[in-house]
Image (tube, coloured by chain):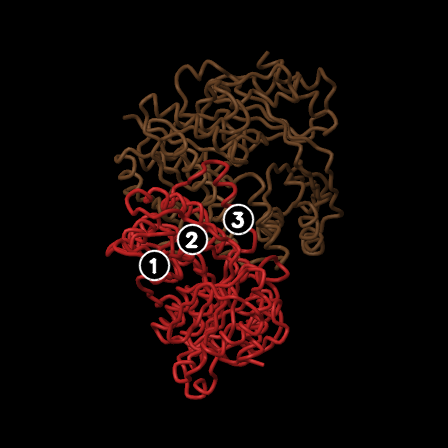
Chain colours: A red, B brown
Amino acid sequence: MPLIVQKYGGTSVGDPARIKNVAARVAKYRQQGHQLVVVVSAMSGVTDSLIRQAKEIMPLPSEREMDVLLATGEQTTIALTAMALHALGIPAVSLTGAQAGILTDGVHTKAKIRNITPKKVHALLDAGNVVIVAGFQGQTPEGQVTTLGRGGSDLTAIALAAALGASLCQIYTDVDGVYTADPRVVPAARKLDEVSYDELLELAGAGAKVMQLRSVEFAKKFGVTFEVRSSLNDNPGTIVKEETKSMEDVVIRGVSLDKNQAKLTLIAVPDQPGVAARVFKALADAAINIDMIVQNVSHGAPKPITDLSFTLDKPDLLKAQKVIEGLKKEVGFREAVANEQIGKLSIVGVGMRSHSGVAAKMFETLAKEGINIDMISTSEIKISVVIDLAKGEQATRAVHAAFLG
Amino acid sequence: MPLIVQKYGGTSVGDPARIKNVAARVAKYRQQGHQLVVVVSAMSGVTDSLIRQAKEIMPLPSEREMDVLLATGEQTTIALTAMALHALGIPAVSLTGAQAGILTDGVHTKAKIRNITPKKVHALLDAGNVVIVAGFQGQTPEGQVTTLGRGGSDLTAIALAAALGASLCQIYTDVDGVYTADPRVVPAARKLDEVSYDELLELAGAGAKVMQLRSVEFAKKFGVTFEVRSSLNDNPGTIVKEETKSMEDVVIRGVSLDKNQAKLTLIAVPDQPGVAARVFKALADAAINIDMIVQNVSHGAPKPITDLSFTLDKPDLLKAQKVIEGLKKEVGFREAVANEQIGKLSIVGVGMRSHSGVAAKMFETLAKEGINIDMISTSEIKISVVIDLAKGEQATRAVHAAFLG
C-alpha cells in the first residue's frame, strides 16, 4: 500500500472542530487505499500561551525546560487527532517524537535530527493503524526532550517521509501552494504546479513565507518530493522536487518582495585588505545574519576609500548598529548610515541559468517604471535588487507582468 | 543529607505566581540542608479543560489517548516549576513520570505502579539538583504513556518517597491537615497532630476528603510516614504513620459525615440461600460499589421473607435501580425503594479496639438528640450509622462534642 505522510500546521488543528476536519481528510485518503502517517503541530495559540507563562516566571527560561514545556503542545494535538479518527471508526495511534523514534542532538530549542528509527511506526502501520506523530520534537539518546525550532513540524514530516520511504509527503497549510508572487500584491499571480527545491529555497530566502529553509534543504538532501497544499479545500497544491526537463522551459518561477530588510552603509571605509573581514566577523560573532553585500569601487589616492553596504533583517538593525559603532576606531570609516525604507525584490527560476538577458530585462522593466536600483546581487537562479520600499509593490507587479504575464 | 519528597496539588501550582510560591518554599527547605524531590500536579483547571476538548471530539475517547493527552498537564507544570527554581538561582531539573523511572502496568487512565527505578533521580540529586517530577503519570515497559487515575500525584509522591528512602514525604494541599471533623460543620473541630494509616483510611472511606484511599494504602504497605499540610501557610500539618503507643490513649480520632450516599431497600425478598449473592454479583458486574449492607431478620412461614438494604454512591443510584429492576422476576422481591435523603455518620479511632462502650455512647448521644438510626455497620476502628440527611450536621456536632469535646 502506498504510504503518504501528511503534515498539518497549527491553524489546521486550531480547535476540536478543525481537528475533526483533519480526521475527515485523513479518512478520505485511507479509503483510497493509502497507509498514512500524520504529523501535527500544536494547536494555534498554544505555543505562544506556554511561552507567555514561562516568561511570567523567568524572562530567560532554561532551554531544556522550554523544550519540556513546549513539547506538551504537540502531544495534546496527537491525542486529540487520534480520538477524532477513532470517532470515524478508524484505528489510529498517537506517538510523541520520542516514541516515533526521532533522535536528535542535544541543542535544546533548535535540535537537529540525527536519526530516525521508524520500527514502531512501521509496526503500527502494518497493524492497520493511522499513525499520528507529534511534530517539532524528538529526544536525545539520553532521553531528554528536545524541540527542533521554527518550522520543526515540516521537518518532522519530511524526515519521516524519507525514513519511511513514503511515496508522497503533503504539507497542509492555509494557502493553496506556492505562487508566482504574493497574490495580495500581484493580482495576476498564479499558483505553480511544480517548483524545484532550489527555486523554493531562493523564494523562501527572498521572503516568500512558504516553508522554513531547513525543511526544504532536508527534502533536497534526501530527495523527498513533497506537496504544499491547503487544508481548507481539495485543490491540488504545488509539488516540490528536483528539477525536471519540463521545468527548464520556464525561465522565471516567481517574484518575491522582502519588506523585512534594512540596509547599513559604512561611508568612507579605508580600502585595505581585511577591513570587510573584520566587519562581518564581528557581525557573525553577534549572531547577525547578513544577506546582500555591495562594495563600491574605491576612489582617492594615496589612501583609497570606499563605501560598504549590506542588508540584514530589520529586527537585527539596532544590534548591528552597536556592533558597527564599536568598530569605528579600529576600522576607521567616517559614518554608518541606516536605511529601513528598503525592499528586496527577487526573481527566481532555474531557467535563467540557460537564458541570457534575464537581468537586463528586469533592470529595464524597473527603469521604465522610474524605479531606482540601490543594490544588486545575483545567484545562478536568482536576481535580487534593493529598491525604495515605497515602490516595492509597484515594482513587483511590473516585474511579474514582464516575466510571468 | 536528609531527603524530603514534597507534593503540590493543582491549586498550589494554579498559576505562575503560585508556582513561584512553591519554588520559594522549596528554596527554604533546601537552605535548611535538605535534598528535595518535588512532585507536582497539573495546574488547576488544565485537566478539566483537556477532558472537555477530548469530549468535544468524542464522547468516550480511547483511554490510551486520554493518557497521552492528560500527561501533558503535569509535564507543563514540571517545566514551569523548574524555571521558577532557576529564577531563584537553584539548580533544578524536571522529569516526566517516564524519565523518573516510574513503571506501571498497561491499564490506561488507572494504571498501577509496578516498579520505580530511581537511578536518574538519584544521579540528579547527587549532582546538587532539586528534582521536579510529574505526578499522576508513568510509562509501561513498552514505552506507552499511562496515568494513575484520581489521587495519582499523591501516589507518585509516596511511591517515590518509598523508592528513594526519603526521610519525610509532605503532601501539600489547601487544608492545614486532618481534622477531627469538617470545621465547616463542627466549629469545635481540631487539627490532629498525628493519625494512623488505618484511621485515615477509615476517615477517607467515610467521606472525609483528605486523600484517595489507594495512596494511604500504598503508604501503609511500604511504611511511608507522610505529612498532610497546607501550601498556604507554615503551620505544621498532620503526620500519618503506623500507630504509636501514645495514639492508644485516644479513643476516637475523628467524626465524619458522608452526604454522598443513597440507600436502596429491596422489600419482601425471599429469604433463601444465594439471593443476596445474586443481587450483589449483578451490581458488581455493573461496576457499582456498595458500602453498607443490612439484612433484617426474616419473618413469615413457610416461605420467610426479609428486607435487604444497602448504600451506594449517589451518582450510581440510577444505574443500580436499573440493575435491580432487571432482577425483579428472578429474585422475586416485592419492590425496590430508594432514599437519597440519608447521611452516613462515622466515628473512627484505633482506640476503640480496646475501649468498650464506644458504640453505646454514640447511640445514646444520637438518641438524646432525637435522631433515629436507620442502619449500623461497624469495623474494628470505625462505627458508621445511616441517619436522616437533614439531621446529619446536628448529629455530627453532637457526636464530636461527646467524644472529642
First-in-chain label (3 vs 1) = 3
Q: The residue marked by circle 2 belongs to what chain?
A: A
Residue identifier under label 2: A264
Q: The residue marked by circle 1 belongs to what chain?
A: A
* Callout count: 3
Residue that protrudes farthest toward the top in the picture: B405
Mark 1 residue element: loop
What amino acid type is highlighted by mark number 2? Leu
**Where is B39 relative to A75, above or below?**
above
Where is residue A50 drawn, in percent x and y? Answer: 51, 46
Residue identifier under label 1: A112
Q: Nearer the viewer, residue B221 or A201?
A: A201
**Where is A29 relative to A65, above or below?**
below
CA gap between label 3 and label 2 equals 32 Å
Residue that protrudes farthest toward the left in the picture: A273
CA gap between label 3 and label 1 equals 22 Å
Q: Nearer the viewer, residue B228 or B347?
A: B228
First-in-chain label (3 vs 2) = 3
Crowd class of label 2 (few under 14; some 14 to 19; many from 20; radius 10 Å): many
**Where is B16 relative to B238, above or below?**
below
Where is residue A127 drawn, in percent x and y? Answer: 43, 72
**B308 left or right of B24 in image:** right
Mark 2 residue element: strand
Residue at x 54% of width, y 36% of height? B15
Residue identifier under label 3: A48
Residue B131 occupies quadrant:
top left
Q: The residue marked by circle 3 belongs to what chain?
A: A
Residue at x 51% of width, y 61% of height? A343
